[in-house]
Amino acid sequence: MTAPDNALLDAARAKAREGGRLSRDEAVALSLGEDFHTLAHLAHARRMALHPEPVVTYVVDRNINYSNVCVCGCKFCAYFAGPGDERGFVLSEEELDQKIEETIAVGGTQILMQGGHHPDLPFSWYEEMLARIKERHAIHVHAFSPPEIAHFAKTFGLSTREVVKRLKAAGLDSIPGGGAEILVDRVRSAVAPNKCSSAEWLRVMEEAHEEGLRTSATMMFGHLETPEERIDHMLALREVQDRTHGFTAFIPWTFQPENTALSQCRPLTAPEYLRTLAVSRLVLDNFENLQVSWVTMGARVAQLALFFGANDFGSTMLEENVVAAAGVRFRLSEEEIRRVVRAAGFEPRRRLMDYSPAPAEYAD
């Protein structure tokens, strides 16, 4: 990894300042060579050009893991339980109903629902779960990341597009961007060899967009990838977004190594997180929204992130299990999110998954 030459860095800086589209080499140059504060200034200027009002959005929701049983065995995961493990669970109808009702009771508008790659549940189980939720609860269902959809397709002999269509028909409203990790197969084969490939992840998202479902996109970084591979991840997302315009937001977050098979990795520092966040705002010129990761970085760093390109504070996340299993347990109530955002000089505003304003009954 060598420092970029000054001419390339100067050209990249000028293009970023003018709002131009960065090439791979220019993005790498900014990532590796730009001054920290200049990078923040460039990213914040881009954010304000996209969202001139001094508003930071957030959503009230809950992360629900319907099961932790998984055959993937990803090296970065401290939450899963293999088949037969006594720690494994599948939520009952009653448990799921209770979690959703608790979310609605505090004004929640959506649930983010994901699980492992369960080897034994039939596809009808997932369809029936969605149908029950929509029958019983007025809630947006943001569920089943691309690796889960690829797992369903492989397990049940369906195409990924058929899976998406059937889940949508059963009640699925949108798809979370989980399971992306780093969209470079060298990295994926090392950290998650049993999970879908980069191309499969991207194809599922493109198919979902074509079928009328909006999705988010994530990047888990700070493990076995290089800075250049982080840029490749962003460029792969940018290419799909050029075609579909179906991604609502990008959410980069740092790998938490404790209790995982990659515990030799060191946690990234706040400046490393903020640099990557700022670069993503400059590279992803066709993404409207960039989300902070207070769950992994805490409230103070997330507050700083509002000046490194981010315009969204994510969610209240009334429940979060996966990151907590890796030893990181930051928690913020809605009141605390609003206080942190206001202290940074912005106005907090509730939103829905697609970034439209929350309904009038949730008005500030």
Image (tube, rainbow, N blue to C red):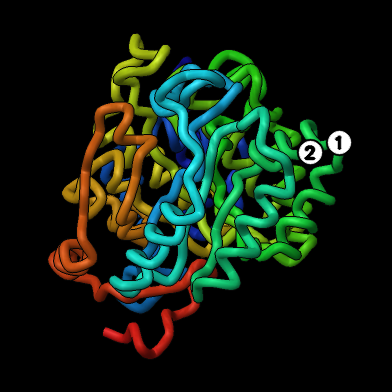
Visible in this render: residue 25?
Answer: no
Cα separation between marks 2 and 1: 6 Å
Q: Is residue 95 above or below residue 50?
A: above
Find numbered disc 2 in the image and state the secondary structure of the residue it sits on: helix
Q: Please name the residue that numbered disc 2 is placed on.
A: 153
Q: Is residue 78 left or right of residue 113?
A: left
- Residue 340 in percent (x, y) is at 17, 62
Q: Is residue 198 above or below residue 158?
A: above
- Please, what is the three-letter code of the amino acid marked with disc 2? Ala
Visible in this render: residue 39?
Answer: yes
- Please, what is the three-letter code of the amino acid marked with disc 1? Gly
Q: Is residue 266 left or right of residue 244?
A: left
Badge 2 crowding class, 10 Å Cα cut-off, few under 14, some 14 to 19, many 20 or more, is some
Identity of the residue furthest to the bottom in this view: 360
- Residue 326 in percent (x, y) is at 32, 27
- Residue 74 in percent (x, y) is at 53, 21
User: Which residue is drawn at the image coordinates 56% and 27% (left, top)?
Assistant: 70
Q: Please name the residue that numbered disc 1 is placed on.
A: 157
- Residue 13 in percent (x, y) is at 45, 46
Q: Is residue 338 above or below residue 68?
A: below
Q: Nearer the viewer, residue 120 or 80?
A: 120
CB atoms at circles 2 and 1 under 8 Å apart? yes
User: Which residue is drawn at the image coordinates 65% and 64% (left, top)?
Assistant: 131
